[in-house]
Amino acid sequence: YIYIDTKGEVIYPHLTVDVYPTNDGRDIPGLAPLLGLSEGLRAYWSYKTGWGFINDKGEIVVKPAYRNVHSFKNGYAAVQDWNKNWGFIDKTGKLVIAHTFSEEPSDFQDGLAIVRKRNGDDCYIDTSGNVVLDKINEQGINNLGLFFNGKAFVTCYIGHYNGMAIGVGTIVLDRDLKHYKVLYPDPGVNGKNIVGYKNGRYYFKDGSIMNESYQMVRYDEDGYNSHPNPFRNGLAKFQYDKNPKSSTNPYKCYIAETGEIKIIFKEPEF
C-alpha cells in the first residue's frame, strides 16, 4: 500500500506498508487493510501483537495490542480487545471508555457514538461512556444515525395497527435529542449511511446527496456507470467507462466536483 495526494503523486514514501494476514469477524484469514491518516494518526497492523497507531513520521504512538481498531474521529478511536469486546482510546492510547461493548460501535461524531445493547437496542453514548438516549424501541425509533451539522436522522414507525408498523418515516433529531422534523413518506434516508456534511449538503455512502431542505440529489452523469463516493479534499472516487453499455471493466479514477477527471488508473492492456 502507498499514499498519494490529490495530484496522484506518491507521498509519505516511508509509510509504504506491506499487508499481513489478519482475521475478519468470522476468524477467516485475510489481509489487514490500510487505514488512512486520520487526525494525525494511522492504524497499522503488527502480525505479532495486533493493531496500533503511528503518526505521519512513522513513529509508534499507540503500541499494537488490539484485535481490531477504527481510525480516530473526534479525538477517540474504537478498539477491540482480544476478548472481542470494544472500548475507546484517546490519542495518547489511554483507555477512556472500557471494553464493555460486545458489538462493534460507531465512531464518535459531534460528541456522540452509537452502541448496541445485548438485547438489540441501539443507544447514544457520550465521550464519558454515559448513555444519553435509551429505550428508543419503546418510542418507535430504530436505526439511529450519527450527528452531522447538529442533526441526526433516525427511522421511526409513524403508526401501528395490531402491533404492526403501518408507516415508516425518518425523524431529524437536533443535538438536544428532541424531535426536529418528520420526513414522511420515507425519502430513503438511512442515518447510518451518512458519511459527511459540507456546504449545506449531507453525503451518503451510496453517493446520494441531500440538501438542508431534505431533498435528495444524486449524481448520474453520462459516462459514469455508478454513483460517486462522497467528495473529500475536492475529489471523489468514480468508475469511468467511455461506453457504459459495454461489458469491459471501467477505469478507476478520481473526479473533481465539476465532473472533471483528475486522476485515472488505467487497466493493463492484456
Image (tube, helix red, strand yellow):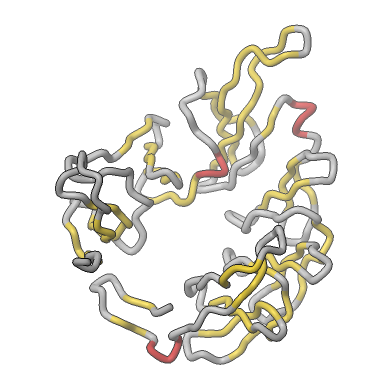
Q: Position of residue 12 (x, y in %)?
A: 39, 86
**Count of marks, rendered view:** 0
Q: Position of residue 195 (x, y in %)?
A: 48, 50
Horizontal side of residue 11 vs 42, given as left or right: left
Horizontal side of residue 225 vs 145, given as left or right: left
Question: Which residue corresponds to the image point at 74% horizontal and 78% vertical from the top-left?
Answer: 94
Quarter of the rendering containing residue 42: bottom right
Question: Which residue corresponds to the image point at 76% horizontal and 47% vertical from the top-left?
Answer: 116
Residue 192 higher or lower than 111, as above or below: above
Q: Position of residue 134 (x, y in %)?
A: 79, 39
Question: Which residue corresponds to the image point at 71% horizontal and 58% vertical from the top-left?
Answer: 26
Quarter of the rendering containing residue 110: bottom right
Q: Position of residue 52 (x, y in %)?
A: 65, 80
Residue 146 higher or lower than 245, as above or below: below
**Quadrant containing the C terminus in the rendered view:** bottom left
Q: Which residue is nearer to you in this view: 148 or 249? A: 249
Residue 123 higher or lower than 103, as above or below: above
Quarter of the rendering containing residue 261: bottom left
